[in-house]
Image (tube, grey):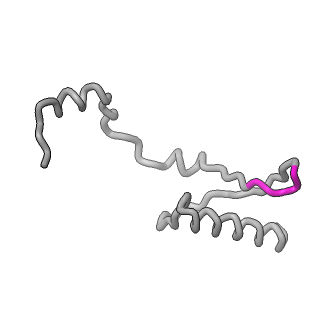
């Protein structure tokens, strides 16, 4: 990767962090990133998260349906 591409990736990562759309991770995993040119001449950052998704801990219990959770809360009072 050239120095211009490295600068562009760093700029895009800094923008995402500043906007709050991304946050720093303490994970030992790394995700490969490439830049793809867009029609208007700018760059789009694309990452391949398949490896991280494969090692993540899956849900041990299914997520409950909203209807079931609301039924359990019916009649409760919060202050």
Classify residue 7 as left or right of residue 61.
Answer: right
Q: Position of residue 54 (x, y in %)?
A: 52, 45
Occupied quadrant, residue 5: bottom right
Q: What residue is drawn where x is 32% and y is 39%?
A: 60
Classify residue 60 as left or right of residue 69.
Answer: right
In-front residue for pair 19/8: 19
Q: Judge whether residue 70 is colored magenta.
A: no
Classify residue 78 as left or right of residue 18.
Answer: left
In-front residue for pair 59/16: 16
Q: Position of residue 38 (x, y in %)?
A: 84, 50
Quadrant (top left, top right, bottom left, bottom right) of the N terminus: bottom right
Instruction: Tell me which secondary structure the magenta stretch mostly adopts.
Output: loop
Furthest residue to the front? 79
Vertical side of 58 occupied by 1: above or below: below
Vertical side of 67 occupied by 7: above or below: below
Q: What residue is drawn where x is 33% and y is 33%?
A: 62
In-front residue for pair 51/79: 79
Vertical side of 11 occupied by 34: above or below: above
Q: What residue is drawn where x is 78% and y is 57%?
A: 35
Tell me the magenta residue range.
40-44
Classify residue 40 as left or right of residue 68.
Answer: right
Q: What residue is drawn where x is 41% and y is 42%?
A: 58
Q: Position of residue 73 (x, y in %)?
A: 17, 33
Total number of numbered discs in the rendering: 0
Q: Position of residue 24 (x, y in %)?
A: 52, 67
């Amino acid at each position: 990767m050239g120095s211009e591409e490295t600068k562009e990736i760093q700029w895009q990562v800094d923008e995402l962090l500043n906007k709050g759309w991304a946050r720093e991770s303490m994970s030992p995993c790394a995700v490969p990133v490439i830049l793809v040119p867009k029609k208007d001449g700018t760059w789009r950052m694309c990452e391949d998260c398949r490896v991280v998704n494969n090692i993540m801990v899956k849900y041990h219990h299914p997520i409950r349906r909203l209807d079931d959770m609301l039924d359990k809360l019916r009649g409760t009072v919060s202050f």
